[in-house]
């Protein structure tokens, strides 16, 4: 670990200078030799670094969402070129180039802050050894060695021996209790951060191997940090715990305010937006209007959460506009603009007597040629008599359509004698 830290010694002087400047501020408030002064200096260093890394964090969020959107296409490429790994890699790189996605962008914040992490480790290791480093002179070195956080010196580790801990004016029990609690908090914050990402901010409609990998990392990363944490000084544990808490809070803000489309967080966000829009009759912030504008522009490509949002607005009597605002859905205005279809009026159902009188009226008009020759329907049972000629006509027409077989004479055939052979 010392070899890795020495590789980042080029940034040791800037890191030590930043810590000393914060120490002057907090030393005037809590005393220069207290753990609060040095501990808050390390926390302030973390906050300053993470503020500078916000643009990289935004780029990381965009890269992760692009990777989630590309998962179905990546899976199709893997299945298509299952036996040709080289062609599979070429198609993957081509897909990344076409969509402008960089798989390494999600690691940029961690890679960017790693030099500061190892530089701080190098500074604290030299303080524990009693060596000056960077801008920390003999006076600041003595002050840092006296600083304790809940009874544990800044430079002490969980694996230190009792003699080394006693040289820093502390007890081994206090050091191990404090470091164990900080390691547990560090691993738990890492686990919760990854868990809320998987449960709330992932598109649940897309089931890909990427999601399985993220679930595995959710359990592997905390274990890795727990194993590595026993070799970290207390000051480094303060640095890493502050970093995890910052990441967790930053991610919670992103999930609540700009969730991934199709995720559980988006459903919750659109429900809050629906209640606010229907209660006030408008979309108040510009950012929310931009989200509504994006949903309207999608049209039939909306996901289930966005469809429920549009349906909820309609039930409340509102309609989302193309500019991201909402307006009252007036029925008269919609009909004038052709937005609401008019109902088709069904004709009234007539009674059986009226239908029969109407049929007789039409038959009498056709037979007599005038309306005056209208006849009333007869009550006599003439149906069988009328049916006989119709049946006879059908029989005659059916026989007329029959074609004679070959060898037979045309016309009516004479019946055969009973004694004749068939």
Image (tube, helix red, strand yellow):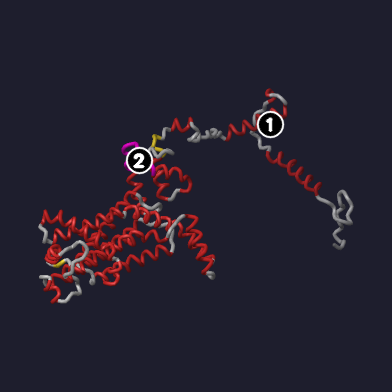
Q: Quadrant of residue 417?
A: bottom right
* Image quarter (top left, top right, bottom left or bottom right) of the N terminus: bottom left
Per the rendering, the mark at residue 113 is none
Q: Residue drawn 11% across and 54% down? A: 28
Q: Residue 126 lies in what quarter of the image?
A: bottom left
Residue 96 locus on image (x, y percent): 47, 58
Residue 174, quarter of picture: bottom left
Which residue is denoted by mark 2 in the rendering? 286
Closer mark to the observer between disc 1 and disc 2 = 2
Residue 77: x and y in percent read: 51, 63
97 in relation to 354, above or below: below
**In the image, is residue 369 above or below residue 261?**
above
Q: Quadrant of the C terminus?
A: bottom right
Is residue 9 something one can see in this rendering?
A: yes
> Mark 1 near mark 2, Cβ–Cβ under 8 Å?
no
Residue bounds of the magenta highlight: 274-290
Q: Residue at x 40, y 56 (%)?
A: 63
Q: Give the percent coordinates (x, y) of residue 278.
A: 34, 39
Q: Secondary structure at mark 1?
A: helix
Q: Considering depth in this image, is 338 or 17 the residue closer to the camera?
A: 17
Q: Vertical placement of 258 versus 91: above or below?
A: above
Instruction: Please indicate whether residue 375 sits to the left or right of residue 67 in the image.
Output: right
The answer to whether 152 appears left or right of 74 in the picture is: left
Say whether residue 149 is visible.
no
The answer to whether residue 82 is left or right of residue 226 is right
Is 317 colored magenta in this rendering? no
Residue 338, position in %: x, y? 50, 33
Q: Which residue is mark 1?
A: 363
Secondary structure predominantly adopted by residues drawn in magenta:
helix
Determine whether 128 is above or below 196 in the image: below
């Amino acid at each position: 670990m010392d070899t890795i830290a020495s590789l980042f010694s080029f940034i040791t002087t800037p890191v030590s200078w930043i810590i000393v400047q914060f120490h002057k501020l907090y030393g005037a408030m809590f005393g220069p030799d207290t753990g609060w002064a040095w501990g808050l200096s390390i926390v302030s260093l973390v906050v300053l670094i993470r503020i500078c890394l916000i643009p990289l964090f935004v780029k990381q969020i965009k890269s992760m969402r692009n990777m989630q959107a590309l998962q179905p296409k990546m899976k199709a490429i893997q299945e298509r070129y299952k036996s040709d790994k080289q062609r599979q890699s070429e198609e993957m790189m081509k897909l990344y180039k076409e969509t402008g996605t960089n798989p390494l962008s999600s690691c940029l914040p961690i890679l960017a802050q790693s030099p500061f992490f190892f530089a701080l480790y190098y500074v604290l290791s030299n303080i524990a050894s009693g060596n000056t480093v960077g801008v920390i002179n003999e006076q600041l070195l003595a002050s840092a060695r006296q600083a304790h956080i809940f009874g544990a010196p800044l430079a002490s580790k969980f694996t230190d021996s009792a003699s080394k801990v006693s040289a820093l004016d502390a007890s081994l029990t206090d050091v191990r209790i404090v470091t164990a609690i900080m390691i547990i908090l560090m691993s738990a914050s890492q686990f919760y951060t990854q868990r809320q990402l998987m449960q709330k901010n992932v598109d649940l409609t897309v089931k890909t191997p990427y999601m399985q990998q993220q679930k595995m990392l959710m359990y592997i990363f905390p274990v890795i940090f727990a194993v590595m944490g026993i070799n970290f000084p207390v000051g480094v544990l303060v640095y890493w715990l502050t970093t995890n808490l910052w990441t967790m809070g930053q991610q919670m803000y992103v999930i609540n305010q700009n969730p991934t489309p199709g995720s559980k967080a988006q459903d919750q966000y659109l429900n809050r937006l629906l209640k606010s829009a229907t209660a006030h009759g408008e979309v108040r912030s510009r950012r929310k209007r931009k989200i509504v504008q994006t949903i309207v522009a999608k049209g039939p490509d909306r996901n289930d959460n966005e469809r429920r949002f549009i349906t909820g607005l309609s039930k409340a009597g509102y309609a989302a506009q193309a500019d991201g605002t909402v307006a009252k859905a007036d029925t008269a205005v919609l009909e004038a603009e052709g937005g609401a279809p008019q109902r088709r009026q069904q004709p009234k159902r007539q009674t059986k007597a009226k239908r029969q009188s109407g049929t007789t009226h039409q038959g009498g008009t056709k037979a007599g040629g005038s309306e005056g020759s209208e006849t009333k329907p007869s009550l006599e049972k003439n149906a069988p008599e009328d049916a006989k000629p119709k049946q006879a006509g059908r029989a005659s027409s059916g026989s007329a359509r029959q074609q004679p077989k070959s060898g037979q004479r045309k016309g009516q055939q004479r019946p055969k004698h009973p004694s004749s052979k068939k």
